[in-house]
Image (cartoon, helix red, strand yellow):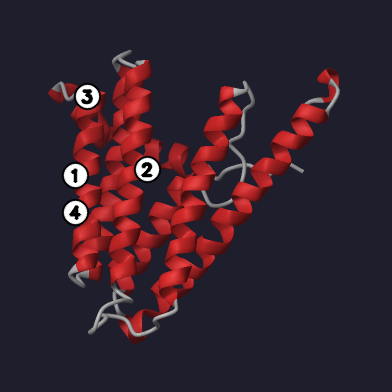
Amino acid sequence: MKLQPSALRDQGTRLLQPVMDLFVRTGLTPNGATTIGFVVTAGAGIAYFFGHLQLGGLLVLLGGFFDIVDGYIARRRSMSTLFGSFYDSTLDRVSEVVVLMGVMSLYVGDRPTLGVWWMVYVVAAAIAGSLLVSYTRARAEGLGIDCRVGLMQRAERILLLGIATLFFGSWRSGVVLTWVMLAMAALTNLTALYRVYWVYKYTNAAPAARP
């Protein structure tokens, strides 16, 4: 059974199309939108570091919006390039690490914002899993295999983290964020493992029977 990614990005694109059309008309380039999204998302990591969870959640969601805008502009203005794809993917990985390092900082130090110290290891597992989800897809695509499968891809991670911190912040010692990070740590790594299994099945299937 193939676990299809959610349609969050496609649905979001349709809902936000009138707003994104404004960015197309301003003349903003795809790489420009990617850079803005990176700066905004990195700002979320800094906000988490200083304990401003709700601001961090807002910036995570805003950065995710620009992550949709850059691709939309590229398609609408026929400005898709190999470098643009590389640039976007690279900054996505860097920004994700910055954000999750900011979240990790909430659980460490002499006076942590949230008090469950072992969550440091959970956040570290979420960082590793998030990078592996992207890496397994990139390696599969390098082999000519479509590997956009799994349950915890970038859109899901952005929405879960952004909504959890924007609306719940540190409520009850961050219990909502704790459960989100536990889910993210588990599901990102399971998604990476599932992609390994998916590529194994694909490469060992008869050409006519390949999914």
Instruction: Name the residue type under label 3.
Output: Val
Q: Assess disc 3: are there few (<14), some (14-19) or many (≥20) residues with their C-alpha within 10 Å of its C-alpha.
A: some
- The residue under label 4 is 43
Q: CA distance from mark 4 to mark 3?
A: 24 Å
Name the residue rendered at 58%, 36% in the picture.
148
Q: CA distance from mark 4 to mark 2?
A: 15 Å
Neighbour tally class for label 2: few under 14, some 14-19, many 20 plus, Cα within 10 Å: some
Per the image, the residue denoted by label 1 is 39
The answer to whether residue 180 is visible is no
Where disc 3 sits, the SS reads: helix
Residue drawn 28% across the image and 63% down it: 102
**Marker disc for residue 93:** 2
- Of circles 4 and 2, which is in front? 2
**Which of the marked residues, 3 or 2, is nearer the chain's N terminus?**
3
Q: Amino acid at mark 4?
A: Gly
- Say which of marks 1 and 3 sits in front: 1
In x, y percent, where is residue 193? 65, 49
Q: In the image, is residue 66 above or below residue 128?
A: above
The answer to whether residue 46 is visible is yes
User: Of 50 and 209, which appears nearest the observer?
Assistant: 50
The amino acid type found where label 2 is placed reads Arg
Q: CA distance from mark 3 to mark 2?
A: 25 Å
Q: Which residue is mark 3?
A: 24
Tag nearer the camera, 4 or 3? 4
Q: Mark 1 or mark 2: which comes first in sequence? A: 1
Residue found 38% across the figure and 61% down from its top: 161
Secondary structure at numbered mark 1: helix
Q: Which residue is at 32% across, 66% downward? A: 103
Locate the C terminus by quadrant.
top right
C-alpha distance separating marks 1 and 4: 6 Å
Q: Is the residue 126 above or below the residue 207 in the image?
A: below
